[in-house]
Image (spheres, rainbow, N blue to C red):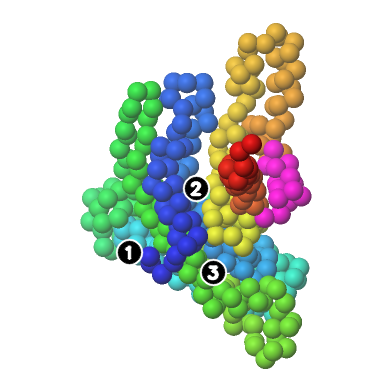
Amino acid sequence: MLGIKGKDLSVFLLVAMLALLAPFLLNPFPVDSAMAQFNAGYPDLMQRFVIFGIFAIGFNILFGLTGYLSFGHAAFLGVGSYAAIWMMKLVSLNIIPGIIMAIIFAALFSVVVGYISLRRSGIYFSILTLAFAQMSYALAYSVLTPITGGETGLQIKPGDDPLLSNLAEGEIGRANLFGLEMGDSAILRAGGWEFTMNVGYYVCALVMLVAFYLAIRIFRSPFGMMLRAVKSNQQRMNYTGLNSRPYTLAAFVISGMYAGLAGGLMVAMDTQVGPERMFWTASGEVVLMTILGGAGTLIGPVLGAGFIKYMENIVSKINSTVLHEWFAFLPDGMEDFLVTIFYPFVGKGWHLTLGLMFMAVVIFLPGGLVEGGQRIASIFRRGKKSGAGDESAKQETPAE
């Protein structure tokens, strides 16, 4: 099916099912319940799940396959975002031209950065990519303000009149897909539950599935095998007479295009761009997503992106008031003690929780969340096999 089979097809169908049912799976608690604050099925967060999933999938093609660790991938995210917003301001509010230009500009910029950075490897490559990202951030923040809007960034304003859009005077344009606005939603109610079916989310989810499918084809292609050879032993590969530079540059550019695609989708969902998207912390975030989920795996980066964005948007909202509500059934002294213990790990301290979990994953699960899932699955398989073995032993024992 679609050129993929076996486990790859199963993983693709699993991701497609999760994407389709996300509005239901991410809202497990009734709206009026005390646990409703853990629901993540609102449009903005669901869009971030899949957009940063695309960003992490692309980064994994570079880091997971070749072993080249880039600390500057947010630069391509930012370049793609700026290209998309200018297309919407000048040409059309339809998101497709903006996304296409985001991919093209990110690809061109990644060719330049990759051609220079890939002359070195290891930590020197990482530092070079970080330097390019920080230079890009500085240019966007203060030097190229007529193009980037500087500190305040760019957004669609009432005076903008795209060439291919018919806007009334003073009307603020909205991103759309052939007239279908990204902010349009339908709310389904069932008992105490509410499920939001958002147009923008499903557009992003469809793009993510296409990006995921292409990543599978890259992983299983001869090109992907060459990238694994680079990661395994690049020096030995060079000794065989194969020049690894074109392969690593191609992987770098493909990875940059994925980042540009994510940047274009971010603009399509929220027509506002700022230089903070190019800051070094944004590059570090995608590294965490990939390692946490499982570098070199297919579904790992998507899981890592979803996990971190959930922590950032849900766990960060838990404050002392919420904790007091949780432990209100306890005596006052015990309630205050538990709130004091848990408070540093939630709310503004969610980074501490994420850091501890990241340390645990690196130490005990080097393969990330995917390895954790595989270990759990293997335990169940061993349990079934042992149960089947006991049954067969009983059957083979002769009656006395």
Q: Is residue 24 visible?
A: yes
Question: Residue 361 lies in magenta, yes or no?
Answer: yes
Horizontal and vertical percent for residue 128? 70, 70
Name the front one of labels 3 and 1.
Answer: 3
Residue 106, visible in the rendered structure: no
Question: Which label was assigned to residue 91?
Answer: 1
Q: Nearer the viewer, residue 182 or 235?
A: 235
Q: Which residue is mark 2?
A: 49
Q: What is the spatial separation of the Cα atoms under label 3 and label 1, in whole angstroms? A: 36 Å
Q: Quadrant of the N terminus?
A: bottom left
- Most distant residue in the front direction: 400
Observer-nearest residue: 97 or 305?
305
Query: The residue tagged with tag 2: helix, strand or loop?
Result: helix
Closer to the camera in the image, 296 or 244 = 296
Q: Position of residue 241 (x, y in %)?
A: 67, 91
Which badge, 3 or 1, is on the more N-terminal residue?
1
Between disc 2 and disc 1, whose residue precedes? 2
Q: CA distance from mark 2 to mark 1?
A: 28 Å
Describe residue 291's horizontal placement relative to residue 299 as left or right: right
What segment is highlighted magenta in the picture?
A: 353-367
Circle on res. 219: 3
